[in-house]
Amino acid sequence: MKKFISAKMINLADPRIGSKIIFKTDDFFAAAHRILKTDIPVFKDGLFDKHGKWMDGWETRRRRSKGYDYLVLKLGKPGKIFDIDIDTSHFNGNQPTHASLEGCFSRSKPNKKTKWTRLLGKKKLGPNKNHNFKSQNKSTFNYIRLNIFPDGGVARLRLYGKIEIDKKTINNKNINLTSVLNGASIVGCNNEHFGRAENIIAPGKGKNMGDGWETRRSRGKNFDWLIIKFGKPGLIKKLEIDTHHFKGNYPDTCSIQTANISKNLSNKLIANNSKNWKFILNKSKLSAHKKHVFKKFLTKRNKENYLKINIHPDGGISRIRAFGNFVK
């Protein structure tokens, strides 16, 4: 395999899965909700609003008293957090000196009596960079508290982990097995030059051409591919390949392979072995800005937990949906 781009786990702070800010001590300079945006932070030279310099992230005013600032995030889906990314891109001289992270699992909105569990102790932050940390607690949480000391700005907060799948979803006979809401995640792909692979499993319809997976233009007899891991093993009954917004850059054809892998293998090894997976859909014609539905498959299967989509020769897909049910 010439090229392999390994994907991170699901970003549990992604607003597309319902995550949102429910409290902040202050966001005078930059609105707290921006810290959850999924695009790369930008700097707009010379842009000011009524509070001062516009910044792409969350920024509090300068504290003139003791204490620190914090915000509380409700996760769209409860989950376990493994990796933490506190991104201070473009905050230089106005970033916090330190930050820490706490979590709780609560059926009601946290209050002053809530007992918070440490995920990350107080860590030093630098200007204009990604700070990657390992979570110190692998319990299931649905509320997260980010503390910044004493004040300042953070561009993005990304919390990578696994969604906790509830019993109602497990027993559902018609769910989207490739949806991030049901625990699906990207294993990797060979290219994501124009659109990130993770977009293809996001909920709902793509907002525009940027909200999908798009590869660079290939110059040869190549094809592009992407691999998805289901939240749990399942059985596909219907496939949807959605090319909405891709009009002059959709793939000519696509094919689908699946596998059921019980061993704990690295993402790269899974990708290397995927060329031998069984095809459930041979090369099928695609067209512009359309939802393509497939119900007839090449082989009978008992269950599968990995899906690989091959696109020929290149291009963009907004969403892939594999409807079916989880199986034991």
Image (tube, helix red, strand yellow):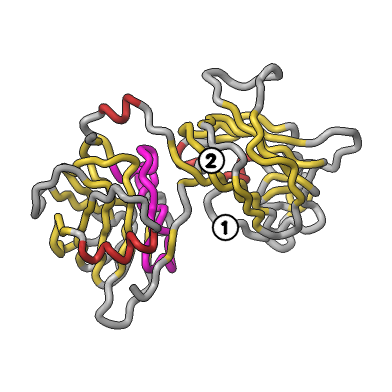
Secondary structure under tag 2 reads: strand
Q: Pinpoint residue 164: horizontal percent, then vertical percent.
A: 42, 33
- Where the N terminus falls, by quadrant? bottom left
* Among the 4 quarters of the image, the one containing residue 287: bottom left
Whole-angstrom CA distance, mark 1 to mark 2, is 21 Å
Q: Amino acid at mark 2?
A: Ile
In the image: residue 1, left or right of residue 9: left
Residue 93 magenta-drawn?
Answer: no
List the residue tagged with mark 1: 40
Residue 182 lies in the magenta stretch: yes
From the image, tell me which residue sits under label 2.
81
Q: Nearer the viewer, residue 25 or 237?
A: 237
Give the residue drawn at x 67%, y 38%.
101
Visible residue check, residue 263: yes
Q: Residue at x 26, y 59 (%)?
A: 309
Of residues 183 and 1, the one nearer the viewer is 1
Q: Nearer the viewer, residue 236 or 199?
A: 236
Q: Amino acid at mark 1?
A: Ile
Q: Is residue 98 above or below residue 65?
A: below
Q: Which residues are magenta?
A: 177-205
Residue at figure coordinates x 85%, y 42% from the top left = 62
Residue 183 x %, y %: 38, 40
